[in-house]
Amino acid sequence: MMPLLTPLNLATLLDHPKTILLDASWYMPAAARDADVDFLKAHIQGAQRFDFDGAIKDSSSPLPHTMPTAHAFQSAVRDLGISDSSRVVIYDGAGIFAAPRAWWMLKAMGHANVAVLDGGLPAWIAAGLPVNSGAATHATPGTFNAKPVPDRFASEDDVLAALAGSATVVDARAAARFEGTQPEPRAGLRTGHMPGALNLPFDQLLDGGKYRTKDELRQRWAAAGIPDSGKVITSCGSGVTASVLALAAEVAGLAPVAVYDGSWSEWGQESRPELPVVQGAA
């Protein structure tokens, strides 16, 4: 599949036995929305909840919704009916926000055939397509085998090496947070950014809750100073909107990028002075 699908594309795939549809909705606390409650009210037929802030995260980590171990991830997605041959399509209730995170997690664990519904549930409803209510239907367990792809992951050590010149680091947070003029929404974090990082706020890649065109994505990528070759690592507050950039690169036909899973929730900690932070523009 192409990395992005329109609502009509998805409608033609829903009844295919290999299609697995996932609702990966997640919201920042300020949004005052409960993704599980929203799912019960309205979801696309056959969708399963992919909860990367609950069931599908590293519960031993103090960081928000980091990737679980390969074994734990494999077990969780098998419970959703996913096999190696599945065609997985992901959406969220905001349009484009959380779905790319689930897309990245599956890609990073070795599942190639995965796409995101461009515009998410709002685009589906706007197209006049039906929604269901109530709990998800029981899924027949799948047989997915996790095969982690190291080039799609980045650790703090990878970021330190990148800042020394091995790769380009791109921060998806808003400019005010990147520059350190706006407080972080999570307590205990310093303000600013990694020295040498570039800034491309994720919302600059979107238009009305959908991705911009391939040419526009390439233009915005270049305008931020990001090279179209060489290794790129994306970061954000907690690895969610960094994944929006990662999917944008794929949509634009650029090389796959790595996502810094810990992102600013790890790097910006007041207790981690060995991880350098600066303020000001990129």
Image (tube, rainbow, N blue to C red):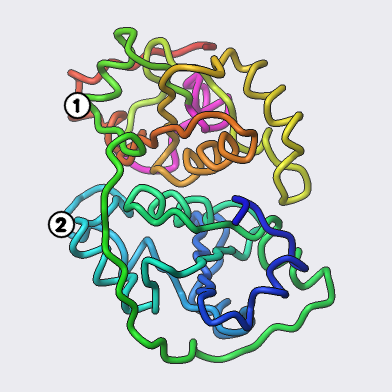
Q: 15 left or right of 263?
A: right
The CA span between labels 2 and 1 is 19 Å
Is residue 89 or residue 44 the one in the foreground?
89
Q: Position of residue 111 (x, y in %)?
A: 39, 56
Q: 163 left or right of 270?
A: right
Mark 2 or 1, closer to the camera: 2
Q: Is residue 175 visible?
A: yes
Is residue 192 or residue 261 the one in the foreground?
261
Q: Secondary structure at mark 2?
A: loop
Instruction: Name the residue type under label 1.
Output: Arg
| Residue at position x 30%, y 33% in the image | 154
Q: Position of residue 210 (x, y in %)?
A: 72, 49
Residue 282: image tag: none
Q: Main secondary structure of the magenta part?
A: loop
Instruction: Name the residue type under label 2.
Output: Ser
Q: 147 left or right of 203?
A: left
| Residue at position x 56%, y 19% in the image | 228
Q: Which residue is mark 1?
A: 272
Q: Position of residue 90 (x, y in %)?
A: 55, 63
- Segment tinted magenta in the rendering: 171-188
Q: 40 left or right of 153?
A: right
| Residue at position x 50%, y 54% in the image | 28
